[in-house]
Image (tube, rainbow, N blue to C red):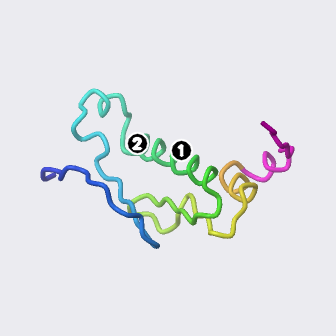
Amino acid sequence: AGEAAAPKPCAGTKGTQIVVEDLFYNVPMRRAAMRGAGEEYNRVLDVVQAYAIDNAGVAMSCQKTGETASEVHTQRDHSTIDVIRMVHGSALARELLPFEAKS
């Protein structure tokens, strides 16, 4: 792989696509702790799922390179419960209880 450019801030416009490649290429100890590309992808997937739940109303998807289907795929009109159902399954979503916190 070539040398990576330094990250720089940019606006997240409608339809922004974020590509994660060689996440730990320059951190040998972190890369050695991973059992392979599958584990690295699973960690990225965990983060995307958490962001999807926290940001219901923002369409998100996460697709592994070479796969045809996304493992996470939310729409702008999905509620938080819809996203939880998609990420953790209907059985867990059915057990959730609504609550309000007042400060």
Quadrant hosting residue 29: top left
Sequence-first disc among 2 and 1:
2
Where does the magenta region start and end?
89-103
Q: Which residue is mark 1?
A: 46
User: Residue, x 86% and y 44% (percent of image)?
Assistant: 97
Q: Residue furthest left?
A: 2
Q: Which mark is residue 40?
A: 2
User: Residue, x 40% and y 66% (percent of image)?
Assistant: 17
Alpha carbons under labels 2 and 1: distance apart = 10 Å
Category of crowding for the residue at label 1, using alpha-carbon neighbours closer than 10 angstroms: few (below 14), some (14–19), many (at least 20): few
Q: Is residue 95 among the parts visible in the rendering?
A: no
Q: Nearer the viewer, residue 33 or 27?
A: 27
| Left or right of 49 in this view: 31 | left
The stretch drawn in magenta includes residue 91: yes
Question: What secondary structure is marked by label 1?
Answer: helix
User: Residue, x 36% and y 39% (percent of image)?
Assistant: 36
Question: What secondary structure is marked by label 2?
Answer: helix
Query: Is most of the magenta stretch helix, strand or loop?
Result: loop
Amino acid type assigned to the residue bearing label 1 in the image: Asp
Quadrant placement of the C terminus: top right
